[in-house]
Image (spheres, grey):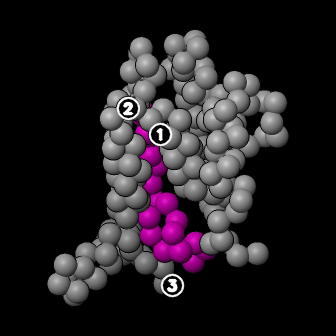
Amino acid sequence: VNPFKVLPLYAQDMVDKYMAMSDPSELPPHIFGLCQDAINGLRSKRKDQAVLISGESGAGKTESAKLILSFTTEASRSEEGGLEEQIIMTNQVLESYGNAMTVRNSNSSRFGKWIDLHFDKQSAGLIGCSMTNYLLETTRVAGVAPKERGFHIFFQLIKAKASGN
């Protein structure tokens, strides 16, 4: 099994299928069903919603967060557009500051993250986002264990400087 191969489980037709459901529990359990349920709660009950992602190292927390963020921004796309892509792109930049190569995982998150999406009360369209990062391994800034690497941002900056960008 290639862990870098995109599975049809997360393809656009799955996004569309869960987005079209007023009751996502009618479909098999899926991360997109969880997202749609939260969006439905936001729209129908007008109550704040929260999704907590936890798990052991390598369990897929970062990938799950990306899928949830991607689904939610697409499902709540405003008419003007553009903000959704900015949020997704910002998330990728922030990962550079908090992800590092460890012995177990080449893109391991070494930080916690709270993402607060802001929605319009009338349309339930996405109108903003704030992200708070909690660096969990400040020691990695100054040194790392054998066969590990510091945060990705350091290597990306050096590579950019070397290429003249």
Which residues are the magenta region?
99-117
Q: Secondary structure at mark 2?
A: loop
Going by the numbered disc 1, the residue's amino acid type is Thr
Q: Earlier in the sequence, mark 2 or mark 3?
A: 2
Q: Which mark is residue 79?
A: 2
Q: Secondary structure at mark 3?
A: loop
- Crowding at dot 2, Cα within 10 Å, few <14 / some 14-19 / many 20+, comes out as few
The answer to whether the residue labelled 1 contacts the one labelled 2, judged by CB atoms less than 8 Å apart, is no
Q: Give the percent coordinates (x, y) of residue 23.
A: 74, 25
Is residue 110 among what the camera can see? yes
Q: Between residues 61 and 83, which one lies in front from this camera angle? A: 83
Q: Earlier in the sequence, mark 1 or mark 3?
A: 1
Q: Quadrant of the C terminus?
A: bottom left
Q: Quadrant of residue 129 in the image?
A: top left
Q: Residue furthest left?
A: 164
- Is residue 116 within the magenta segment? yes
- What is the C-alpha distance between the residues marked 1 and 3? 37 Å
- What is the C-alpha distance between the residues marked 1 and 2? 12 Å
Q: Give the percent coordinates (x, y) of residue 77.
A: 44, 35
Say which residue appears at 62% left-offset and 51% top-offset.
12
- Is residue 82 within the magenta segment? no
- What is the C-alpha distance between the residues marked 2 and 3? 48 Å
Q: Which residue is mark 3?
A: 147
Going by the numbered disc 2, the residue's amino acid type is Glu
Q: Residue furthest front?
A: 79
- Crowding at dot 1, Cα within 10 Å, few <14 / some 14-19 / many 20+, comes out as many
Q: Which residue is mark 1?
A: 73
Q: Give the percent coordinates (x, y) of residue 10.
A: 66, 54
Front disc: 1 or 3: 1
Front disc: 1 or 2: 2
Q: Give the percent coordinates (x, y) of residue 79.
A: 38, 32
Say which residue appears at 31% left-offset and 75% top-offset.
156
